[in-house]
Amino acid sequence: MKLYHFIGIALVALGLSACKSDLDSIPDSFPKTHLIEEFTGQGCGHCPRGMDSVHAFMEKNPNYILVLHHTYGTDNFTVYGSQKIAKQLNVSAAPQACIDRTKTKSADGNKIIFNPISALHNFDTEQLASTTYASVNIANEYDPETRLLQVTVSGEICTKDYPQLKLTVLVKESGMIAAQADFYHTENGWKEFRHANAVRAVLSDPTGDIVKVNKQRYSDTFAFQMSKKWNLDNCSVVAFLTEDFKPVVQAAEKPVIEGTKGGADILHEGITPY
């Protein structure tokens, strides 16, 4: 009996030791990747200038991910998920934007939603945290025959003291040619304009799916049928964690097709004016 008792204690101790070792492998913090969400539309004449401001900002700050929600009216790139996100953030105009869905101080005031044309000029990035307590990793599997995309998002949380987390996953595309109003670069707008970073689909609930954490780790998988109209070489998956709906804790991006840039090298550009 004593021998069995000793073996039982040894096995429990071994299990606790393995668990502790496993959790000890999680770092104390993770480098923060920030998320810029811009709210735009093909009918918005001020929006190309807003895009210019965002891209100029991102050239100096590479640790930012950009997604464009087409919510100014309804156009070729409007999706329900973007509309719901805009409603949750009380966005009613364009161009509008936010960084990490958190209040920031800028020339446009101290608020979550701002006008990128004025707010990103001399924006102080030091006000945003450079590290965070969670990671986001994306693994994509795509079947070209069925056009089925399977996305697995996983990560680690380096603290036991955190609020309810939610995970949002979306697909964006760049390089689409369509019309665009423009009050600054042309007299009557663009008959052909190269659009970039437009949200094409939200795979999770637009307000985020509740994250189930086990031993300070999480993982969730999403399946989605990619449209035949999309150029998948220019598509990428963006995933981000939020505390409830806001703020954004961590973000990540990965091309749908391995070996491509996922449209990262494509910027908005006017081609043929009216």
Image (spheres, grey):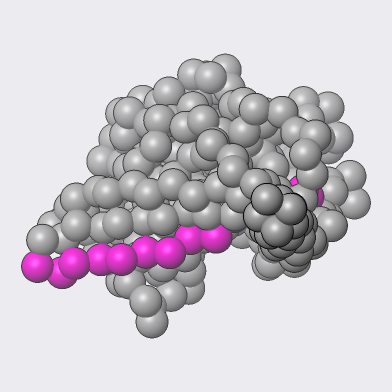
Relative to 245, say whether 187 is above or below: below
Q: Would residue 112 be found to the left or right of residue 38 on screen? A: right
Determine the residue located farthest toward the front in the rendered image: 1
Q: Say if the magenta span includes residue 229.
A: no
Magenta stretch encompasses residue 138: yes
Q: Residue furthest bottom?
A: 259
Residue 166, percent across and down? Answer: 56, 33
Residue pictured at 59% horizontal, 40% vertical: 213
| Residue 8 visible within the image | no
Magenta range is: 132-145
Vertical comparison of 127 with 173: above or below: above
Q: How many marks?
A: 0
Q: Which is nearer the eye, 192 or 21? A: 21
Along the line of sight, the residue nearer the viewer: 22 or 58: 22
Q: Position of residue 142 (x, y in %)?
A: 25, 66
Residue 203 location in percent, x, y? 35, 41
Identity of the residue drawn at 40% across and 26% down: 83
Residue at image coords 74%, 53%: 2
Residue depicted at x 55% and y 60%: 137
The picture quadrant where one finds residue 214 is top right
